């Protein structure tokens, strides 16, 4: 038997459950359908490693509108199967690229290989309030599901965000 790389059981531990909020956020996400499909394809291709990227779009009082996704290198090569760290150079290149356009960076997506699409305590540590965090669960290189989360500084939890796919 090959050594098991991922440990999905940890998602049932009290420490992990503590970062999950039950209540949906009042804001919603409208996700461009092509961008949503592209995000899933990036996650499946990256398996068995965690892959990550940025969401480009707009934010208003209603919530997030995701127009595009762009992959960014995961520079955590030591623990690439279970951690991600966005390459700052990749982030800056995208930031420069969209300057002057209507788009802004509004969130960060990443994959959870052989694990559920729930955020971890580590995900919470690196999360920014106001950003949207989709997590793509990938089992055996197939996308199982995608959930979107928003961190809340007051509750110190991620709350689920309702997603609608649309041709933006
Ligand atoms: Zn994660």
Image (cartoon, rainbow, N blue to C red):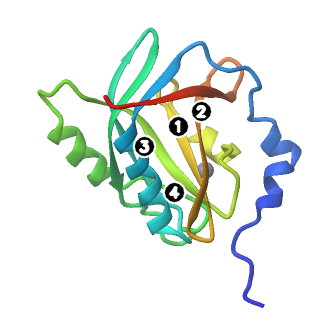
Looking at the figure, which quarter contains the N terminus? bottom right
> Is label 2 within 8 A of ligand 1 (CB to nearest ligand atom)?
no
Q: Which residue is under mark 4?
A: 84
Tag 1 near tag 3, CB within 8 Å: no
Can residue 130 be seen in this snapshot? Answer: no
Disc 1 crowd rating (10 Å Cα; few below 14, some 14-19, many 20+) is many
Sequence-wise, which precedes: disc 4 or disc 1? 4
Can residue 150 be seen in this snapshot? Answer: yes
Is residue 45 rendered to the left or right of residue 90? right
Please tell me whether mark 4 or mark 2 is closer to you in this view: 2
Sequence-wise, which precedes: disc 1 or disc 2? 1
Between the C-alphas of marks 4 and 2, the distance is 16 Å
Please tell me whether mark 3 or mark 4 is closer to you in this view: 3
Between the C-alphas of marks 3 and 2, the distance is 15 Å
Task: Label 1: state its secondary structure.
Answer: strand
Sequence-wise, which precedes: disc 4 or disc 2? 4
Sequence-wise, which precedes: disc 3 or disc 4? 3
> Is label 4 within 8 A of ligand 1 (CB to nearest ligand atom)?
yes
Residue at left offset 54%, top offset 36%: 127
Disc 4 crowd rating (10 Å Cα; few below 14, some 14-19, many 20+) is many
Task: Label 3: state its secondary structure.
Answer: helix
Q: Which mark is residue 38?
A: none
Between the C-alphas of marks 3 and 4, the distance is 20 Å
- Above/below status of 126 relative to 114: above
Disc 2 crowd rating (10 Å Cα; few below 14, some 14-19, many 20+) is many
Q: Position of residue 158 (x, y in %)?
A: 66, 31
Q: Which residue is under mark 2?
A: 149
Q: Which residue is under mark 3?
A: 36
Q: Position of residue 48 (x, y in %)?
A: 56, 72
Tag 1 near tag 2, CB within 8 Å: yes
Q: Which residue is under mark 1?
A: 133
């Amino acid at each position: 038997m090959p050594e098991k790389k991922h440990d999905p059981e940890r998602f049932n531990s009290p420490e992990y459950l503590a970062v999950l909020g039950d209540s949906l956020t009042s804001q919603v996400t409208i996700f461009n359908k092509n961008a949503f499909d592209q995000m899933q394809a990036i996650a499946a291709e990256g398996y068995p490693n965690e892959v990550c990227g940025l969401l480009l779009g707009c934010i208003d009082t209603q919530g997030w509108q995701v127009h595009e996704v762009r992959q960014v290198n995961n520079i955590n090569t030591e623990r690439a199967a279970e951690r991600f760290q966005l390459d700052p150079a990749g982030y800056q290149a995208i930031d420069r690229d969209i300057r002057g356009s209507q788009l802004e960076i509004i969130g960060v997506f990443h994959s959870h290989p052989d694990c559920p699409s729930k955020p971890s305590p580590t995900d919470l540590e690196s999360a920014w309030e106001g950003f949207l965090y989709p997590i793509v669960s990938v089992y055996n290189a197939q996308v199982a599901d995608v959930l979107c989360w928003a961190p809340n500084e007051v509750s110190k939890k991620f709350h689920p965000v309702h997603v609608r796919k649309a041709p933006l």
